[in-house]
Image (tube, grey):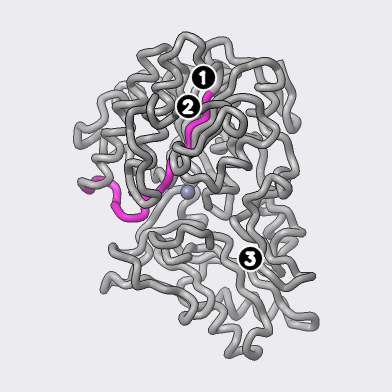
Amino acid sequence: MIRVNGRDYRLAHQPTVVVCVDGCEPDYIAQSVAHGHTPWLKEVLATGTVLIADCVIPSFTNPNNLSIVTGVPPSVHGICGNFLFDTESGTEVMMNDPKWLRAPTLLAALSNAGQSVAVITAKDKLRKLLGHDMKGICFSAEKADEATLDENGIDHVVEAVGMPVPSVYSAQLSEFVFAAGVELMSHERRPDVMYLSTTDYVQHKHAPGTDGADAFYRMLDHYLGKLDAMGCVIALTADHGMNAKTQMDGTPDVVYLQDVLDRWIGAGVARVILPITDPYVVHHGALGSFATVYLPAGADHTDLARRIGALRGIDSVRSRKEAAAFFELPPDRIGDLIVVAERSTVIGTAASRHDLSALDAPLRSHGGISEQRVPLIVNRRLRDIDPARRWRNFDAFDLALNHVE
Ligand SMILES: [Zn+2]
């Protein structure tokens, strides 16, 4: 047994794979199964363990991936978005460096307990956070050709997988993750524990049940079926769901909150931060359903919260204290107000700061409570679990390591 962040885990005694399918709204699975594309998933739904879990809010990639590998919410691990606002310097700071991580990962703990651990991510932005203090293999599909024994615990990845390094904006980037995972598991000295994390490029473009989505899940099904056939325990979950964020004419449904606050209290007086912002914005235009607002000293927080909450498309506004408690967020890394949009609406800063010209499909995005429900599926029947309790995506390792027969 090891104890990590207050939770106990058994060491893996059979190869164990936790998969985070980025942006996997449960309906993607339902539709691909109904359309006959995913025979492995269909079988697992009938014979394994099938739960719906809540992801952490903001329903973004990094906070949730870090929750899954630490087993705790952002209030403990500290990663609550891609960006935080440093009030002292007045600048937005990227949070993808391990120095922002406040809790050890289970992956590091397992590797320090002598288990062989492998981590494969689609985008490189997550690699350093996930691999922090971990011994073993850790590389991204995006930079698979740059992997070295020294830095990543493995080299010649591209040759071994037999696939060229895909574009960062492609379904193949996720396929590379699965193909590399199958490659690693097919060796005699296979990992005891493997964490695979894909990208939501497909989910941002394609709604559940469409050809593009079904093709993605057919691919996923193929590789996970292979891992299952090798005897792996597989726990599949997601970092967040995904919804259409459009008006009826197909254009993005955006509340430009910085513009609104500039009109109300003066230009640049309040500061709207969108923690979805990252270097890869082409598929979502940096628009999600979650924002945090820093207000100037002396501002009437209660009145501004009430007025923002009354805007069309806004679901809820919470003070820092309320949001930190309700969403389990680190209070020192969020603003004075936390604003969540309704299911079909996203929050922008100023209209002039969002380049929507690169959006080549109607906007689909995430970030809100409307994207909180995600699948939590294990390819085995589990013991001692209460299907009625509130499950979290960060229970995935607990299920896979502690509850498999
Ligand atoms: Zn994501």
Place residue 91 in its image quadrant. bottom right
Q: Which residue is mark 3?
A: 338
Q: What amino acid type is highlighted by mark number 2?
A: Ala
**Disc 2 or 3, which lies upstream in sequence?**
2
Q: Which residue is mark 1?
A: 16
**Is 361 contained in the magenta span?**
no
Foreground of the two, 312 or 254: 254
Q: Find out whether the residues at labels 1 and 2 contact each other: C-beta distance under 8 Å.
A: yes
Residue 99 seen in the current view: yes
Q: CA distance from mark 3 to mark 1?
A: 37 Å
Is residue 7 left or right of 150 when viewed as pictured? right
In the image, what residue occupies the spot 45% across and 28% down? Answer: 156
In the image, what residue occupies the spot 43% across and 48% down? Answer: 241
In the image, what residue occupies the spot 46% across and 9% down? Answer: 188
In the image, what residue occupies the spot 24% across and 47% down? Answer: 212
Mark nearer the viewer, 2 or 3 = 2
Ligand 1 has an atom within 8 Å of the beta carbon of the residue at disc 3: no
Ligand 1 has an atom within 8 Å of the beta carbon of the residue at disc 1: no
Residue 386 seen in the current view: no
Residue 181, x across and y down, in percent? 43, 26
Place residue 109 in its image quadrant. top right
Residue 29, x across and y down, in percent? 33, 37
Q: Is residue 333 above or below residue 31?
A: below
Q: Which residue is mark 2?
A: 235
**Disc 3 or 1, which lies upstream in sequence?**
1
